[in-house]
Amino acid sequence: MATDSHTAFFYGTLMAPPVLHRVIWGTTSAPTPVHASSLTIRPAILPAHQRHKVRGADYPAVLPCAAGAPATGSSPDASPPSVRGTLVQGLTSGDMWRLDIFEGSDYTRRKVRVRVVESAHPETSPSPQDGNPSTEEIEAETYIWTASPSALEASEWDFSEFVREKMGRWTGEEVLDEGMKEVDGMRGEGEEDPTGGRGANGRITQRLEKEGR
């Protein structure tokens, strides 16, 4: 691949194509042929890490686990934890700059090794839930939670629930339903912002639109 090509592993909101497209290209619509041909997206697994809900937020966090340690809350005989997500190859340095802004100061981008999943439905868009891990390992970068662990819950984050119930405020679909609400993260008065400023009208999104290149 070209020198300016980056590979990343996503395990949260960025597994949803409309959210990824909005962050790196500024649109939630289907990518143009040029954009589509620039990325390779496959399901993958990140071993020896565990995904957690972030308290009061729509998005998750990932932390590394000690080798051989069972997942939090599981029995001592349980398998070591791993995280299913998507492996995206072909990202540019500009894309990574935008992703760094999007993730914010609670996360640090680090190199990891992930195992590619052989999708059960290769003719459709990759699903982080499909298929079984292969023996192919690839080095990628991912965003590890480096803020206080006290902000995390022990329970697992649910991607299907996010897509079904929460993604609208990340893509702007709820704006029309709520009369073009123009508040940070599209939250109601007095409510916490569950997107952390990453929603369609959030402060992080506004920064990307202002400083985007």
Image (spheres, rainbow, N blue to C red):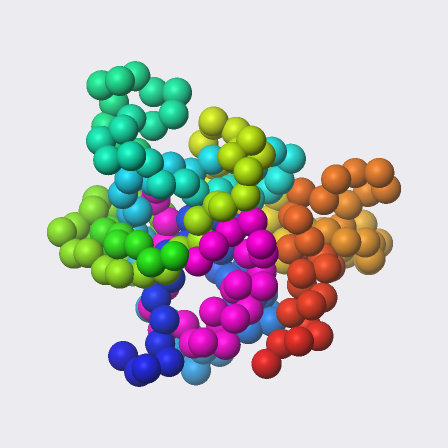
Measured along the vertical axis of the image, is residue 83 above or below residue 112?
Answer: above
Using the rendered image of the protein, determine whether residue 31 is visible from the camera's viewpoint.
Answer: no
Which x, y percent locates residue 25? 55, 73
Examine the image and state in which quarter residue 93 appears. Answer: bottom left
Q: Is residue 169 left or right of residue 61?
A: right
Q: Is residue 163 left or right of residue 187?
A: left
Q: As rendered, which of 104 and 20 lies closer to the eye? A: 104
Which x, y percent locates residue 147? 54, 43
Q: Read off the magenta span.
A: 83-109
Question: Seen from this angle, which residue lies furthest left?
Answer: 135
Position of the C terminus by quadrant: bottom right
Q: How many marks?
A: 0
Q: As rendered, which of 151 and 199 lies closer to the eye? A: 151
Q: Is residue 87 magenta?
A: yes
Position of the N terminus by quadrant: bottom left
Q: Residue at x 16, y 56 (%)?
A: 136
Q: Residue at x 58, y 34 (%)?
A: 151
Using the rendered image of the protein, determine whether residue 79 is visible from the camera's viewpoint.
Answer: yes
Which x, y percent locates residue 99? 52, 64
Measured along the vertical axis of the image, is residue 130 above or below residue 26?
Answer: above
Q: Residue at x 50, y 76 (%)?
A: 94
Measured along the vertical axis of the image, is residue 209 above or below residue 147?
Answer: below
Q: Is residue 169 magenta?
A: no
Q: Residue at x 68, y 72 (%)?
A: 209
Q: Is residue 58 left or right of residue 132?
A: right
Which x, y percent locates residue 110? 38, 57
